[in-house]
Each structure stands twice: as C-alpha cells, then as structure tokens.
Amino acid sequence: MLVVTSCIVAVVAFAGAGTAASGTALAQQDSATSTADNVSEEAYEKEVPSKDDEYFEAADPENDWVSYVNPRDKYRSPYLGDGSGKICVTMVNEAGEVVDGQSIPNTTVKVPTGESLDWHTSANPFTVKYPLTEHYERPLDADQFGDSPDLIKGDGYLDSHCMEIHGLPEDGSVEYGEVNVTGEHADDVDVVGYIQQENEAWDADVDPIDDAESYEEAGGGWTYYPGGSHGQVVVVLQLDDADGNTNGENNSDPNPGPKNSSNDDSTDDNNDDDNTAAETIPGPGILTAIAALMAVALLRLRR
C-alpha cells in the first residue's frame, strides 16, 4: 500500500506541475507580445542629423538650442525684427510612438494661421499630408520631445513636422486656430491636444500625451517681446484604430470586444483556447485515473 500511495502522490504532483507549467507558459506568451501587435502602425525612427550631416544647421554656443535644416523655414521680407518660432504637428500611434502615417493615407491635417503669417509660403493654413514620407523631402525635421543629458535638446530622434517663422517684429503676435483633420482616415486620428511654449527656447522634457492641453488652455498663439522673441506650439495627434487600441483620453473602452461578434462568440473562442490547452498538457483528472489503474494492478500482483 505504501508503494501504491507513493505512485498516486507522484502522479498527482506531476499533474499539478503540468498545470502550473501551462499557466506559466501562457503568461510568458502574453508578456512576449510586442507593442507592435497592439498598434495600427509601427514606430518611425529617424535619428537627428549629426554635426557633419547636410541637414545639421547650427547649434547655440551656450547649448540652449540646436537647429536642423527645414524646407518650411522662411524669413519674412521685408524683415521686421527678431521674432521667431515654430508651428509643428506630431503624430503618434496607440502606444505613444512617433509614426509617419503609413496607416492613414490620403489624410490631411490643417492648422489655421493668423494674418501675421500670410507671407509664409507654408502658412494660411499650415498643412500636413500623410504619409509624410510620400509627400515631403524631410518628413520629420525637429526633435521636440524627450530629454538626453548628452544632447542640447530632445532624445536624439526626430518626432515633429514643423513650419518655422523668422523676421517678425518683436512686439508682434503669432496666432493659430484649432486643428482640422480631413480625408480617408480622419476618423482614425484623435486630437490629443496642444503644447505651447512662448517667449523661450523649447523645453523638450515634456510628454506629448500627458502634457498636451486643450486649444483654449494652450492659448491659441503668443505675443513677442524683446529678449523673449521665440515661441512654439506642437499639435499632438494620435492614431485610434478600429479596435480602439489607444492610450489617448478620448478612448472610452480600452478593452473592446471583437468587431461584429456577440458575447456568445467570444465565449466560444475562449473555450476553444481552453480545450486546446487541455489537449496539449494532461490535466489532473486524467492522471488521477491512471494512478487508480496502477493501484489496482499492484493489488492484483500482490494476490
């Protein structure tokens, strides 16, 4: 009987270990799922130009700013003063990673601009077409977000599409209106908000999602003053795919069910997964039955 009992204990222990192994394997599989599986478009990574690159323009001797060549950088003629600035658009995926808009072709973003920028060839309004890589010589031209101790500004990766402004009077103003998204995939783009920094060098140590504000809160523009003649705004947009996989505040259901599926269908799918796992690794019920048969066999042998 001691032998039989030992056999039963060993088999049941094996069954428990098998069940635990199954749970561990499933958990590891879930954690190994890449971010790309949960976004409608993978991140677009482009390093900032190095100092020997043709697109590196200039850096402040006191390390307050760095500038890269931008085809939408214009100087007012006649030049009226040292007022400068940027109006930018950043598009991120559901995980907050910068994208170039491959998943939203034929989509256009427009930011209305005030009369003070009528002279600018990229203004009235400032227009951005997606995908960026199909419409622009330089899809991204600024590193507006992220902070690295080894860099003057940003984290070393371009993240914004901007128009630059130079030559406005230092007592003048720059105004912009609310962003408008149109086109084939306009419904797949959420307006996260605006990040405006006026009369100072851009502080890149901000988060495009968490620090974005409404249009009213951001201010809709800024007025220059001598000694503080720079200002910038970044309009932050986020992809919101058909399944609602987004980190943006506009998403009301972070875990929506499958499209065009009833609750019963979802339950059936889950049961299928459970059955597959049960067929792959024997459960304790089957092994206990084997142990009982072994016990009967041993008793017969003793007789």
Image (spheres, helix red, strand yellow):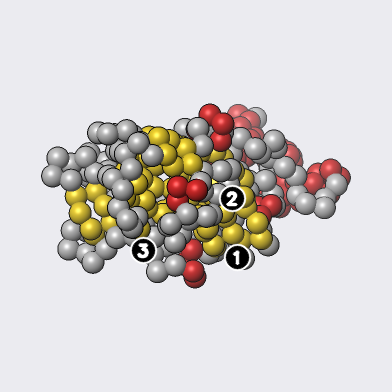
- Lateral position of residue 16 relative to residue 118, left or right: right
Image quadrant where one finds the C terminus: top right
Is residue 113 shown to the viewer in this render? yes
Comparing 265 with 151, the one in front is 151
Comparing 247 with 203, the one in front is 203
Residue 178 at x, y = what percent? 58, 43
- Lateral position of residue 269 relative to residue 65, left or right: right
Labels 2 & 3 near each other (Cβ < 8 A) = no
Amino acid type at image mark 3? Pro
| Residue pictured at 43% horizontal, 57% vertical | 119
The image shows residue 22, relative to residue 3, as above or below, that is below
How far separated are the C-alphas under marks 1 and 2?
A: 12 Å
Amino acid type at image mark 2? Leu
How far separated are the C-alphas under marks 2 and 3?
A: 26 Å
| Residue pictured at 56% horizontal, 35% vertical | 215
State which mark lies toward you, 1 or 3. Answer: 3
State which mark lies toward you, 1 or 2. Answer: 1
Residue 150 at x, y = what percent? 20, 43
Comparing 110 with 272, the one in front is 110
| Residue pictured at 56% horizontal, 43% vertical | 177
Give the residue number, with chain letter if any, for mark 2.
239
- Lateral position of residue 294 relative to residue 99, left or right: right
The image shows residue 123, relative to residue 289, as above or below, that is below
Give the residue number, with chain letter if any, for mark 3.
71
How far separated are the C-alphas under marks 1 and 3?
A: 22 Å
Residue 76 at x, y = what percent? 34, 55
Task: Name which quarter of the figure residue 12 lies in.
Answer: top right
Give the residue number, with chain letter if any, for mark 1.
105
Label 2, secondary structure: give it.
strand
Is residue 200 shown to the viewer in this render? no
